[in-house]
Every structure is written in C-alpha cells, then in structure tokens.
Image (cartoon, grey):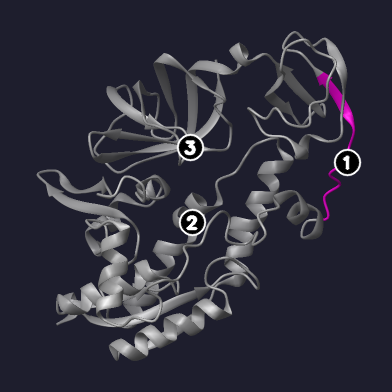
Amino acid sequence: MADKKALIALSGGVDSAVAALLMQEQGYELTGVTMRLWPRSRCCDEKDIEDAAEICARLEIPYTVLDYREAFRRQVVDVFVAEYQAGRTPNPCARCNQFLKFDALLAEGEKLGATMLATGHYARLAETPSGTALLRGRDDAKDQSYFLFAIGAGILPRLRFPVGGMNKDEVRAMARKHGLPVAAKQDSQDICFVPDGDYRRFLEDYAGLDMAQEGEMVDSSGQVLGHHPGTLNFTVGQRKGLGGGSDQPRYVLALDSTRNRVVVGGEDELYRCVVSLAECNWLADLSPGETHAVTVKLRYRSRAASATLHLLSDAQAELRFPEPQRAVTPGQAAVCYQGERLLGGGWIQGTE
C-alpha cells in the first residue's frame, strides 16, 4: 500500500539507523536515502555514506545517494557566509531543514511512490483537533525540535520521528541488540561543513573573506575605545580578544558591519527584554494581532525562558521577556513553545 511506503533519511549515524529499524518493524516498505551535501563534512561524507549503505544491506532495503551539493552550497553555505558578512551569527542547521532537506526528500519520495519521510531527529508528533503538532523529543539532552521550527506545517502529517520517544542510551542499546554496525558511532557535532569547527578559517578558505579588516571598537554611546582586527572575528557576548585597557571586563554588544565597528560594554549591557523576529514560521494556528504566553529558546543549548509573543504579521513578531536575556544574537533562531508543543519561531533581527 502506498501509505506504507516511506523514505528513511540516513546520515550514517546510529539515530537514523535505529529509526529505519523501527519503521521496518512497524511494517513500512522503506527506501534508504542519503543526501550528499558537501565534499568534506561532519555529516553525510563518504564514510557516512558507506555506513548508511551497510545499514540498508543489513535491513535488506534499497538505498540511494542523492547529489544536492549545488543546492546546499547555494541555499545554506552561501547564506552562512552572507550572514557573517552582515554582522550576524547564522544557524545553518535550521536553514538546511527550512530550505532544503525535508521538502527535497519528500519530493524524491513521491517519485518512488512513498508518501512518508522518516528521520532520526529527536522530536515527536501528536494529533490534535486542529491537526498534527510537533513536540519536543522525550530526551531533553538530545531534543532537536529547535532545528525543525521552520519546516512547513503542511508536511507534518507526512513525517515520522521514530526515535523521538527514546533517549540516547535506549537508541544505542537497540542498535547493539540488532547488530547494527554504527551502535557505538560518535555523534556529529557543530556545523557539518566546517569539520574542524574553525568557522573563521572556513570563511577565509572557502569565501576568500579578509578576516583582518581593522576598524573602530566603540562603547554603546559611540565613543571610540580602540581598534579591532575585523568584525568577522567576533560574535555577540564574546569577551575573548577584546584587549585590555579597562578596569572591568568588556563584552561584544553588537556588530556594525556597515561601519566596520565592534560595539562593546559591560556585562550588564548584554541583557535585553525585547526581541524582534522576522521570517517567522508557525506550526500552530496563530494569527497576526494575537498575543500568547510562551517559553522561548534563543539558541539551541539555552534554557527556555518565559515570554509574551506578539504576532505583528504573518512574518514578523516580537518577544517580551519579564526577565532580561543575555547576549541575544541577531541571526540565531528564537523558537517558541507552549508546554511540549513547538509553536514555531523566527530569525532574530534585533533587540531593545
């Protein structure tokens, strides 16, 4: 039956391998697929493709590799570079999910007659009177719902997250029980196309950016305090590399790429109560003009904080926090929840 045909996205890691195993146990007719995204990466490189192929051989399911390198470069990597050039700190994983991965794989599945797409993300789905809801993964330490805020609400009924109700130890134990060769494989970390974690070197080597464009370092009133070696070397909240000459520690408050300035100040100046969002995407039925009590994650590893969400338009919103938030960073995602349910979110534009 068509509704039991599914594509399983395989990264070559243990989570997607166990997701494939669980989907097979649930009676789905699977096709394994890996997207080749970048020549050298922390995810889906040649070794990962070999591992994914072996998993499919063990499960006796067909496997294919899709070449999405050009689309990934254009929609994710080049945007990553442009964001840094604009003085923002990008989140390429959420962008990849938003613009590339899910829609492309669902389209590939349709060619094979598969109506469903399964992945190894730690997230869950639930049916509600108003439709399918996206929930946090049960394992708080591994929950990946933050990176899924920008996918389309309309595709949720066609998705499956088989490991979302498990914790990591349970996933590895199941992999060992079934003899999967990736049971002990280390998780990928950081940005997949920056395998050594050095984004500054990547911006130099890949994009040819000059990281050493000296400019003024100023305080929040605009007074010049000294000079910096280039805005691309800094992010909001950073303390390292600002030099001495001050009785109190200085932190980066903002980056002004237009004037090539780094704005610095004391710890107390890092805190903000109002955050503006753009390019918002809502997975729940929300409308402009509404106000909602929410909890918000301002970065993946941050603790969720209480806030009031003001919906200004379909694409714009404002968050007001009763407790000021530290080092809110333009370019990052602000993701809104009510309880376990992910409502959606947007890209941080600025703060007050």
Asked whether disc 2 touches disc 3, contact meaning CB atoms under 8 Å apart, the reply is no
Q: Quick check: marks 1 and 3 in contact, CB under 8 Å? A: no
Image point (41%, 71%), residue name: 184
Instruction: Name the magenta segment's main secondary structure.
Output: loop
The residue tagged 2 is 99
> How many angstroms separate mark 1 from mark 3 (CA)?
28 Å
**Count of marks, rendered view:** 3
- The residue at the far left in this view is 129
Magenta span: 208-217
Specify which label sits upstream in the sequence, 2 or 3: 2
Q: Is residue 161 visible?
A: no
- Is residue 124 something one can see in this rendering? yes
Q: Is residue 69 left or right of residue 256?
A: left
**What residue is shown with label 1?**
212
Which residue is disc 3 drawn over? Answer: 299
Magenta segment: does it hold 177?
no
Q: Amino acid at mark 1?
A: Ala
Image quarter of residue 118: bottom left
Residue drawn at x 17%, y 78% as measured from the top left: 25
Q: Is residue 215 magenta?
A: yes
Kind of residue indicated by mark 2: Phe
Badge 3: few (under 14), some or many (20 or more) residues near its Cα, within 10 Å? Answer: some
